[in-house]
Image (cartoon, rainbow, N blue to C red):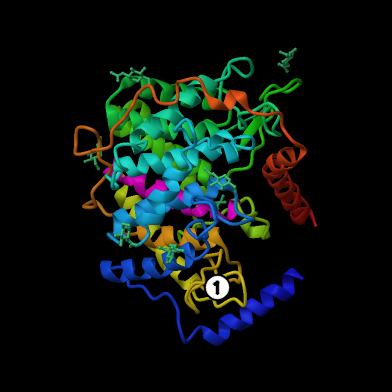
Amino acid sequence: MRTSLLRAAGAACLLSQTANAVQVTLSDTASVKSAASTVAYGLVKYYTGNNTGDTPGNLPSPYFWWEAGAMFGTLIDYWFLTGDETYNNITTQAMLHQVGDDDDFMPTNQTRTEGNDDQGFWGMAAMSAAENNYPNPPSDQPQWLALAQAVFNEYASRWDTTTCNGGLRWQIFQFNNGFNYKNSIANGCFFNIAARLARYTGNQTYADWAEKVWDWETGVGLITPDYKIYDGATDTAPTNCTNPDTFQWSYNAGIYLHGAAVMYNFTEDSATWKTRLDGLLAATTSHFFTNGTNILVEQACETVNLCDNDQQSFKGYMLRWLSGAAQMAPYLFPTVTPLLQANAAAAALACTGSPASGFNGMAGTACGFKWTTGAFDGEVGVGEQMNALSALMYSLVQPTTAAAVTSSSGGTSQGNPEAGTKPSTVLTLAPITTGDRVAAGFATTAIVFSILGGSVFVLK
Ligand SMILES: *[C@@H]1O[C@H](CO)[C@@H](O)[C@H](O)[C@H]1NC(C)=O
Ligand SMILES: *[C@@H]1O[C@H](CO)[C@@H](O)[C@H](O)[C@H]1NC(C)=O
Ligand SMILES: *[C@@H]1O[C@H](CO)[C@@H](O)[C@H](O)[C@H]1NC(C)=O
Ligand SMILES: *[C@@H]1O[C@H](CO)[C@@H](O)[C@H](O)[C@H]1NC(C)=O
Ligand SMILES: *[C@@H]1O[C@H](CO)[C@@H](O)[C@H](O)[C@H]1NC(C)=O
Ligand SMILES: *[C@@H]1O[C@H](CO)[C@@H](O)[C@H](O)[C@H]1NC(C)=O
Ligand SMILES: *[C@@H]1O[C@H](CO)[C@@H](O)[C@H](O)[C@H]1NC(C)=O
C-alpha cells in the first residue's frame, strides 16, 4: 500500500515537473525569498487553526501540538528573514491562544500529555520572537520574553536530583510514559532557553543553569567526550542512566550547538565554550552532513525510510540552529555558509511534487523528505515542507544579517523574572483517563518502534 501510494505520487510528479517547481538562484536574495514564500504557502496550507470552529495553534492530526510550536517558531524567523508579514496574524493569534491559564505554554487541553520538550518548542518560539523584535502582543497579553522566562522557571523547578544526579525528565507527569526517561531534547530545550535568556537579559542566573545542564548531560554520558549527543537514558534501577539510548538525532545536535554558541557569545570564554562549540560543530558535520556534498541526512531513520512524523521535521531545526550558531560566533561562517547553501539548493530540487493527496500548496511545489537524490521522493507533510522552508530561508543568513537582539541592544519585549512561579492550575488536574494515557504513550512508542524497526531493517 505504501509502495503504490509512492508510485502514484511519483507519476504525478513527473507529469508536472516541467510545469512548475521551486526555482532558486542562491546568490539572489529576492529569488531565495520568492522560493521561500512558495514553500511557506504550502506549509501554512496544512494549518487549519484559524478556520471558524477550529483551535488557533493546533495542527490537524497526525501532527502533535509541539510541532505546531515549532512551526510558529519557523514562521517568526520567516518574517524576520524575508520581511513577509503574511503569516504574522495567524502566528500571533496561535501563540497567544496556546499560552494557557498560567501564561506558560501549558494550556489545559494539552497539559495532561505535555512533555518538557513539547513546552520547550513553544517557549523557544517565544524566545525567537523576543530576539527578532517580532511585534509585541497588546500590553494586556503575556509578552514574549516573559513567556520564555515562565518556561525556564518551570524547568528549574522540575530539575530532579532524586536520580542520576539531576536532569530534567522527558515527561512532566508521573502518569505519562517517559517519566522515567531523562533525555537530551528536554534538557536541550532547558539549555537553549537558559543560554538565550542569559544573553538577552544579562542575568547570570540563567547562564549558571545553562552550565549546570551542560555539566549534567556530559556527566551522565548523554554528551560524549567526542561531542556525540545521545537520545536519553532510563533513570530507574538497575541501570540508573548508565545505559543510554545511543541514537543521535539532528535536533539534539542542533539545539546544543546553538546553545553553546550563545554561551560563547555571552561569556567570550574560548577555553570552555569555544572548545565545546568547535567540538559540537565537528561532530555534527561529520555525522549528519553527507561527505562530499554537505547534504543533511537524518541518519538514524532516513536511510532506512523509517522516520516518523516528528522525526521528519528535525532537519529544519538543525538548519535553524546551525545558522543561529554562526550568528552568535561569526568565525564559524566560513564553515557554516557552504552547508546552508548546499542544503538550500538540494531542498529546492526536492520541491517539485504534485502528489495526488496530502498537499494543498501550488502544484509542482510539494517538498519531499530526502535531499540527497536531487528529486522529489513522494514523501510530503508538515515536516518535509518546514524542513525545505528552513533550508531556503536560513541560507539568507550571512555575516551582515542582523543577529538576535538583547535588552541592551534594541530588544523591546517585556520580561518578568517571576513568570511561571505562581502556584499552578496544573496541580488541580483531574485524574488521568485511559484516552490521555494512550495519547501520551504514543510519542514514546513511536520512537521505540522506529528504533526497533530500523534495527530489524538493517539486520535483514
Ligand atoms: C487563515 O490564514 C491563512 C493564511 O494567512 C489565510 O489564507 C486564510 O484565509 C485564513 N483563514 C481564515 C478562515 O481566516
Ligand atoms: C481547548 O479545546 C476546546 C475544544 O476543542 C477549544 O474550543 C479551545 O479553544 C481549546 N483551548 C485552547 C487553549 O487550545
Ligand atoms: C492582520 O490583521 C490586521 C488587523 O485585523 C489587518 O488589518 C491586516 O490586514 C491583517 N493582515 C493580514 C496579512 O492578514
Ligand atoms: C541504581 O539505583 C538503585 C536505587 O537507588 C540502587 O539500589 C542500585 O544499586 C543502583 N544501580 C547501579 C548500577 O548503580
Ligand atoms: C563521512 O566519512 C567518514 C569516514 O569515511 C565516515 O565515518 C562517516 O560516517 C561519513 N559520514 C557520512 C554522513 O556519510
Ligand atoms: C556575538 O554576536 C554578535 C552578533 O552577531 C557579534 O557581533 C559578536 O562578535 C559575537 N561575539 C563573539 C564573541 O563572537
Ligand atoms: C535573575 O534571574 C533569576 C532567575 O529567574 C531571578 O530570580 C532574579 O530575580 C533575576 N535577577 C534580576 C536582577 O532580574
Give me the residue at 39% from left, 29% from top: 149
Q: Is residue 28 visible?
A: no
Q: Is residue 258 above or below residue 35?
A: above
Give me the residue at 60% from left, 28% from top: 169
Measured as percent of width and height from the top left, residue 459 is found at 78, 53
Q: Main secondary structure of the magenta part?
A: helix
Kindly give the residue lying farthest to the right in the view shown.
Answer: 460
Q: Is residue 317 left or right of residue 234?
A: left
Which region of the structure is painted magenta?
311-330
Give me the residue at 30% from left, 47% from top: 134
The amino acid pointed to by label 1 is Phe
- Residue 191, image quadrant: top left
Q: Is residue 115 left or right of residue 331?
A: right
Q: Is residue 162 above or below residue 112?
A: above
Q: Nearer the viewer, residue 274 or 237?
A: 237
Q: Is residue 223 magenta?
A: no
Measured as percent of width and height from the top left, residue 58 is found at 54, 51
Q: Is residue 326 magenta?
A: yes
Q: Nearer the viewer, residue 406 or 317?
A: 406
Quadrant where the N terminus sits is bottom right
Q: Nearer the viewer, residue 343 or 390?
A: 390
Quadrant where the C terminus sits is bottom right
Kindly give the residue lying farthest to the left in the view shown.
Answer: 409
Q: Is residue 331 above or below residue 293?
A: above
Tag 1 secondary structure: loop
Q: Is residue 136 visible?
A: yes
Q: Which residue is mark 1?
A: 376
Q: Is residue 447 above or below residue 409?
A: below
Pointer 1: residues within 10 angstroms few (<14), some, or many (20+)?
Answer: many
Measured as percent of width and height from the top left, residue 155 is found at 50, 26
